[in-house]
Amino acid sequence: MAALLSVWLLVAALLSPTTLAQDGTCTASRLQLSDPPYESYFLSDCHSSSHVILTSPGSGSDASPRLLIAWPAGNSGIAAFFKPENGNSGTLGLHLENSTASGQILDSVNLPGNPNPRVGVSGFIHFDSPAILTLPILGSIRNIRDYTEGGGNLNKDAQNAVQIVKYNDDGATIYRTWFDDTTTTWLDFSPSSGADAVKIIPGDKYTVRFGTGTYRFSATFNYPQMQQLSPQQVLDEASAGLINQNPDQTISLSFLSYKEKLLAGTWRFLTYFGRDSMISALLMQPILSQGEGGAIEAVIAAVLERINRADGTVCHEEIIGDYSTLLNRQKGIKSTAPGCDYKMIDTDYFLPVLMKNYFVDTQIGKDRASDFLGTKASFLAENSGLAYSALAQLTAEKIMKTSAAFAAKGGQTVANLIHLKDGESVGEWRDSNNGLAGGRIPYDVNTALVPSALRAIAALSSAGFFPDHSDWKDTADQYAQVWEDSTLQFFQVNVGASEAKSLLSDYVSQSSFAGPSNGDDITEDVTFYGLALGSNGDVVRVMNTDDCFRHFLLNTTNQTQLSAYLGQTADNILRTFPAGLSSDVGLFVANPAYGGDASIASNFKNSDYHGTVVWSWQLAMMAAGLARQLDRCRTGDQPDFCNDGNLQKKVLTAYNHLWDLINANSDQLSGEMWSWKYDNGFQVVPFSSYSTTESDIRQLWSLTFLAIHWDNV
Ligand SMILES: *[C@@H]1O[C@H](CO)[C@@H](O)[C@H](O)[C@H]1NC(C)=O
Ligand SMILES: *[C@@H]1O[C@H](CO)[C@@H](O)[C@H](O)[C@H]1NC(C)=O
Ligand SMILES: *[C@@H]1O[C@H](CO)[C@@H](O)[C@H](O)[C@H]1NC(C)=O
C-alpha cells in the first residue's frame, strides 16, 4: 500500500447519498476533497462510480498538469497529461467548472451499449493558457501506476492502440480498445463557451491542442459494472445516523464498497486487497451491514473466492481488468481471467477470525452460515464450483498444519515459528522492503495472528463448522494456548535504564533529531517486543505498535505474562519519542532508538513508509485493543491486572493519553499515514513532502474511526 497525503481540506460534501428510489430514479452522491496540488471529485450514481483527480501543479513545479479518472470496475482509468503550448509545465493552470446546465461539477454518463452500457462522467475543464495533450493512458490503473511510479514505463502495445479521431466538427475523441478486443475506453473533448476548436496535430505521435478556455470532456468505458453499496447499504441500520454526521467518511466508504468486494483505496489501490478489507471489517464490524448483500458478507465472500486452492493461501491483491489480460498475453495465453498475488503470510489468519465473529457471534451470521457457505465460487476459474465452505476449510487446514510443530511437546523453537516465504522480503503489513529491517519472522504474525486464528478455528469447529475435522475444537485450542503463552519470549527486549539513556542520546546525535532524548523519563528497565526475528532468532530491536494486534485479537490467560505485557505497552505509549512511541502527531509505528544500530535507524526515518510515522488504522486498533482489555475488568472473570491498582490505572492512563493524541489529530485520521517535523514539538507534515510516492486521498482502513470511539472503560 502506498502513501496517503494527510493534510486535506473538505471543500464540499454534498449530502445526497446514492439511492435508487422506488420509481427507479437515482440520486447521485458526490464528494469533493482538496489536497493541493490535487483536487478530487467523486461521483456515484446507481450505474457507475468515478473518481476524477485534477492536478494543477502551479508555476515553479515541473509536475505535469493532469486529468485522471479512476473507476472501480476492472480497476480501470484514464490519465491525460498536458503541457502548456509555451513555457514550462507549471505555468499551465487547470480547473474544473460547474456545468451551466446541471450546476454540478461532474455529471454521470450512462449510454446504452452492447454488451455493456457505456458509463462514466462528463465535466468542463478550463485551461488558463493554450495546452497540448502530450500523453493519454487508457485502460488499467496498473498501467497508469507503471508510468507514474515505474519511472515512466509505458506498455507499447497499449499505447499503439490509442486512436485519436475527430468528435463532431470541433472536438476530438481519444479511445483505446482493451486487450480483450471487447472493452473500449473513450475520452471526448469539445469546446464550450467559444473556445478554439480542438486541433488534432498529426505527426510522430498524435497530439491534441486546446486554446485558452473551457472544454467539455466525457470519460466513458463499457466494462461490466459492480453493484455499489450506498451509504445506507454499507452501514448497519442502527448506524445510519453516521451518514449525516460524517458525510465525507460515509460517502468515501460507499465509494469503496460493492456487493462483490470492498476496495483498499483510491485512486492507486482501487481493487481487492485481502489484508486491508479484513482489518477494516474487523475494526468496523459494529457498524457494517450484515446479512445477504451486506458489507461483511461482501468482504468474506471476496476473500473466499480468491483463495489459492492448491494450499489454502488467502489472496493479497487481485489482478483484474485490462491488466490481467495483458499479463496473460505476456504468458502467451489469450484470456481475460483474473489472477492473484499470494506472497503475504499474514493475510490467511484474519479470515477465521472474521468468520467466527460473524458466523458464530452474531445471530444474522448464524442464520446465514449454511446458505452463504454453500455458495459455489465463480471468480477464479481454478476455484469454479468449489463451495465457500471447502475454500474456508483449505485455509484453516493450512493454519492447523503450519502451527502444529510449534505447538507440539518441546517444539517451541525459532525454526517452528512462521517465516516470510523464501525469496520474499515482505510478508505482512509493514510491506515496504525495509519495513521489518531484514527480519524474517514477524512479531505480529507469530504472537497474535496465529493464536487468534487458532482460537477462531476452535470456536468455529465447536459451532459445527469444518465437519471433516471435528477434533479441531480441541486441538486448535491446545495449539492456541501454546502460541499465546510461548511466543512473546522470543521477541522480548529488555534494556537497563542507564543503557537506555545512553542509547537515546546516541540516537539523537546520530539521527540529528531536533528534539530532546527524553532520557529523563527512563527510571527503570525499558521493555518492548521487537518487530521481527532474523532467521537465526536475533530480535530486530525496533519498538513498534504491533502490540495492538494481541490486545485487539486475544484474551490471553497467563496472568503474569498479560500483566507484564499490558504494563510495557502502557509505558511505551506514555513515553514520548524517542524514549517511547508517543508524539504530538500520534504514535509512531516504529521507533529504532534502542536498536543501537545506525543502519537500522537510517531505515526507520520519518521519510520511510513504515518508519517513524503515524498510521491511522494502527491508532484505531490500539485504541480498540486497549478498550477490549480494560473491558475484561468488567466481567466476572477478571484478569489479575484489574486488581493491581497501579497497573490498571497505568493502562487506563495510556488509553486516555492515546485518545488525546487521536482527538488532536482528527484532521489526519481519514488519511492513510502521515509524517512530522520537529519544531518546538512535533508538527504534522504530509508524507508526500518527504516521498515522491503519490497518495491515495481515501483508504478503506483509515475510515475505521467511524466505528471506534473513546469508550468509558
Ligand atoms: C460550483 O458551484 C458551487 C455551488 O453549487 C460553488 O460552491 C462552487 O464554487 C462552484 N465552482 C466553480 C468552480 O465555479
Ligand atoms: C506464564 O508466563 C510466564 C512467563 O511469561 C511463565 O514463567 C509462567 O510459567 C507462565 N505461567 C503459566 C501458568 O503458564
Ligand atoms: C475477550 O473478552 C471480552 C469480554 O471480556 C469479549 O467481549 C471479547 O469478545 C473477547 N475477545 C476475544 C477475542 O475472545
Image: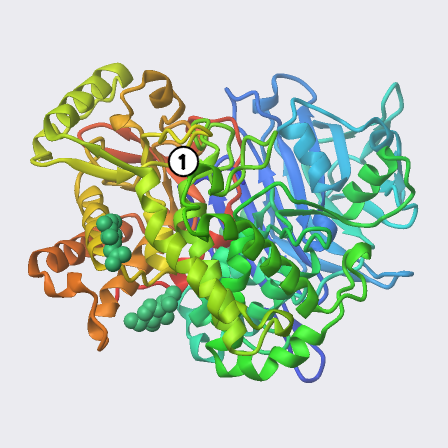
Residue under the image location 16 percent in, 61 percent down:
641
User: Image quadrant of residue 142?
Assistant: top right
Q: Secondary structure at mark 1?
A: strand
Q: Is residue 679 left or right of residue 332?
A: left
Check disc 1 and give the amino acid type.
Ala
* Residue 159 placement (x, y as % from top left): 83, 30
Q: Nearer the viewer, residue 231 or 480?
A: 480
* Closer-to-camera residue (275/64): 275
**Which corner quadrant holds the N terminus?**
top right
Which of the two residues, 364 or 202, is positioned nearer the viewer here?
A: 364
What residue sits 45% from the left and 45% below the top?
672
Q: Which image quarter: residue 101?
A: bottom right
- Where does residue 397 sit, x and y in percent of width and height? 61, 59
Identity of the residue drawn at 46% across and 42% down: 417
Residue 660 shows up from this direction: no
Q: Is residue 33 visible?
A: yes
Question: At 12% across and 55% down in the image, what residue appears?
Answer: 647
The residue that label 1 is drawn on is 532
